[in-house]
């Protein structure tokens, strides 16, 4: 079974970004593989180590430097790479629908039975590419997977939701998006980094697929979040009540109450304050 893993080149998660009116300044910024994509690569490699997958193919869309991202995937254990070249900015201009359309063409070319991708990229945070790809292919999909188990012609997905833990049984072929809880990616060893330099990367131009890549959404403005006063840590509920009584004018009571359990704690704090006021 062939597994296809899309990987994206993004600003490294440890970098403090510089914001310009129309986007993030990418000049002289350290770039790396999107962390969720690393998890997807790791899961595909583990399937190969279990003799379930026969080949792991990594694909990346972006400028020439995206080959570095592919080399990272190859050093982790992917067998070969596909680089779809474009000069469009992949954090804004090349949007999820266009990416999904390009990936659909790659899927049609490679014929994998499973696509594993990160649930989202840390630059756009859209979490749309995987579901859109599944929709375009008319494949089963399992998003935010925290466990992936192959069972014959099916793949069982465990996913954690606000309402509990779900288990989905999907027919293959399928698209799965990886959550942080799925695994912990390995570090590439020096021998594997050297071997990765000899592995094949096929280069294809994005324009050659005949896909409409025009953005559907216009970025009007990008700016840093407004600065705000640091929060206050309290050691106990009694201390919280005291601060709410004496510093209510400065604190956002509703936000604090939400953090400490919603309306029930708000009512408790109110009744506690009333009692203490009467007793004093």
Image (cartoon, helix red, strand yellow):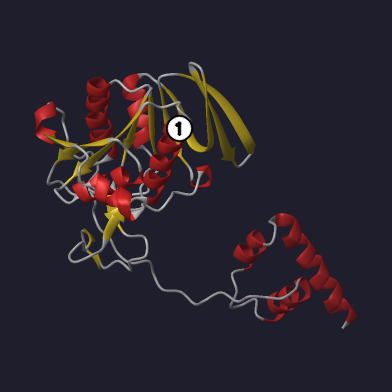
In the image, residue 21 lies at what x, y percent? 22, 63
Residue beneath label 1, please? 47
The quadrant in which the N terminus is found is top left
In the drawing, does residue 211 fall left or right of residue 92? left
Q: Secondary structure at mark 1?
A: helix
Picture residue at 39% right of the left edge, 51% below the top: 35
Specify the quadrant of the image occupied by residue 236: bottom right
In the image, residue 230 lies at what x, y percent? 52, 76
Picture residue at 30% right of the left edge, 64% below the top: 223
In the image, residue 198 lies at what x, y percent? 20, 43
Work out whether residue 27 can be spotted: yes
Q: Is residue 248 above or below residue 89?
A: below
Picture residue at 23% right of the left edge, 35% below the top: 98
Q: How many marks?
A: 1
In the drawing, does residue 167 fall left or right of residue 104? right
**Residue 106 vs residue 230, the one in the foreground:** 106
Specify the quadrant of the image occupied by residue 97: top left
Pointer 1 local density, CA inside 10 Å: few below 14, some 14–19, many at least 20:
many
**Residue 22 vs residue 18, the one in the foreground:** 18
Q: Is residue 34 above or below residue 175?
A: below
Q: Is residue 100 above or below residue 192?
A: above
């Amino acid at each position: 079974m062939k597994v296809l893993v899309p990987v994206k080149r993004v600003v490294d998660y440890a970098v403090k970004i510089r914001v310009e009116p129309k986007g993030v300044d990418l000049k002289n910024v350290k770039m790396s593989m999107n962390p969720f994509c690393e998890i997807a690569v790791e899961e595909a490699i583990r399937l190969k180590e279990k003799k379930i997958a026969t080949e792991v193919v990594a694909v990346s869309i972006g400028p020439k430097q995206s080959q570095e991202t592919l080399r990272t995937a190859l050093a982790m254990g992917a067998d070969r790479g596909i680089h779809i070249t474009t000069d469009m900015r992949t954090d804004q201009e090349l949007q999820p629908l266009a990416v999904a359309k390009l990936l659909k063409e790659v899927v049609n070319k490679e014929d994998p039975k499973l696509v594993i991708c990160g649930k989202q990229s840390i630059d756009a945070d859209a979490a749309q590419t995987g579901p859109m790809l599944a929709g375009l292919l008319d494949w089963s999909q399992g998003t935010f997977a925290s466990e992936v188990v192959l069972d014959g012609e099916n793949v069982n997905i465990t996913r954690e939701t606000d309402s509990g833990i779900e288990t989905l049984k999907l027919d293959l072929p399928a698209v799965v998006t990886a959550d942080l809880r799925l695994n912990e990616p390995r570090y590439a060893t020096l021998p594997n980094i050297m071997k990765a330099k000899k592995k094949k990367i096929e280069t294809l131009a994005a324009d050659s697929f005949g896909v409409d890549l025009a953005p559907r959404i216009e970025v009007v403005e990008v700016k840093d979040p407004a600065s705000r006063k640091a929060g206050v840590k309290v050691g106990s509920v009694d201390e919280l009540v005291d601060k709410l009584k004496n510093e209510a004018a400065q604190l956002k009571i509703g936000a604090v109450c939400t953090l400490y359990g919603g309306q029930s704690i708000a009512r408790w704090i109110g009744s506690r304050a009333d009692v203490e006021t009467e007793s004093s």
